[in-house]
Amino acid sequence: MIINRRKLLSYRCPFCGSIQYKSFSIFEFHDDRILNKLCDCRKSAINAKKDKNGGFTFEVPCIACGDTHKIKITNRNLWLSSINYIFCDKTNTEIAYIGGYLEVRNKIDSYEKEIDDLITKLGYNDFFLNIRIMLEVLNKIHDLAEEGSLMCECGSTDVELTLLDDRVKIGCKECSAHTFAFARSNQDLVNLYDCRYIILCKKINIRETMEV
Ligand SMILES: [Zn+2]
Ligand SMILES: [Zn+2]
Ligand SMILES: [Zn+2]
């Protein structure tokens, strides 16, 4: 059996929102060196080092909760598994993959294909400014609602979503409170991922209204 000592890692940068692919080999860990793979925007990085016990610790910046997660991968899993899934333990989201080139690429491709299929099914292709961002924004709003982190200051958690081309209006069904989640760019997505909860307020923020 030929062991491939060159692997691919992939993660989504919490700062610029892009999916990063970085390859590395076993030789980059020689002499206790720390593996450091910067995002193209240079604001986030995956670091990894070899442990005393022969395993590896990866530090993965997390787009889901904003923290950096320390993940231990055994020597065997790192070099022999076809793919290692890295999860955010706070949100239970897959945030990175480490493994063979083909497996990691396929994983991302199939995720993107799922989104493409959904877009076609919804027939919204021409409506949204950025359909991928819109779907991720909806996903995140849904997650917050499921966690009970989306509510109105009137006490109601019964909200309705109205999809506009570049934003989602989140409105309370009980009163007139509402807010907007923007879906224009990766930056909007990153801002939303920073939110631990959304509270709808009746008082309208003047500055926000002018921006709209
Ligand atoms: Zn970045
Ligand atoms: Zn996390
Ligand atoms: Zn309300």
Image: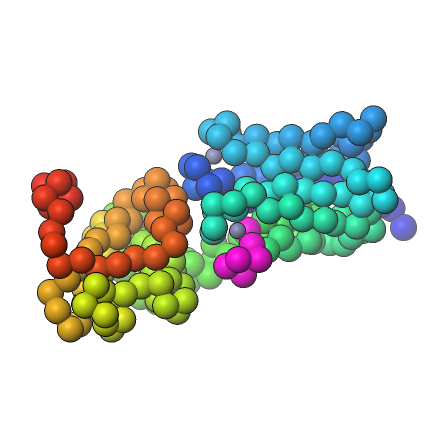
Range drawn in magenta: 88-95
Could you tell me if residue 145 is visible in this image? yes
Residue 89: quarter of image: bottom right
Of 140 and 115, the residue lying toward us: 140
Q: Quadrant of residue 88?
A: bottom right
How many numbered dots are placed on residues in this image?
Answer: 0
Q: Residue at x 80, y 40 (%)?
A: 51
Of 118 and 30, the residue lying toward us: 30
Which residue in the rendered view is the most extreme toward the right? 1
Residue 196 in the magenta stretch? The answer is no
Residue 41 image point, x, y percent: 47, 29
Picture quarter containing residue 32? top right
Judge whether 97 appears above or below 171 on screen.
Answer: above
Is residue 10 among the parts visible in the rendering? Answer: no
Q: Is residue 19 left or right of residue 140?
A: right
**Is 90 situated left or right of 27 in this image?**
left
Residue at left offset 56%, top offset 43%: 68
Quadrant for the C terminus in the image: top left
Looking at the image, which residue is at 36% across and 68% down? 148
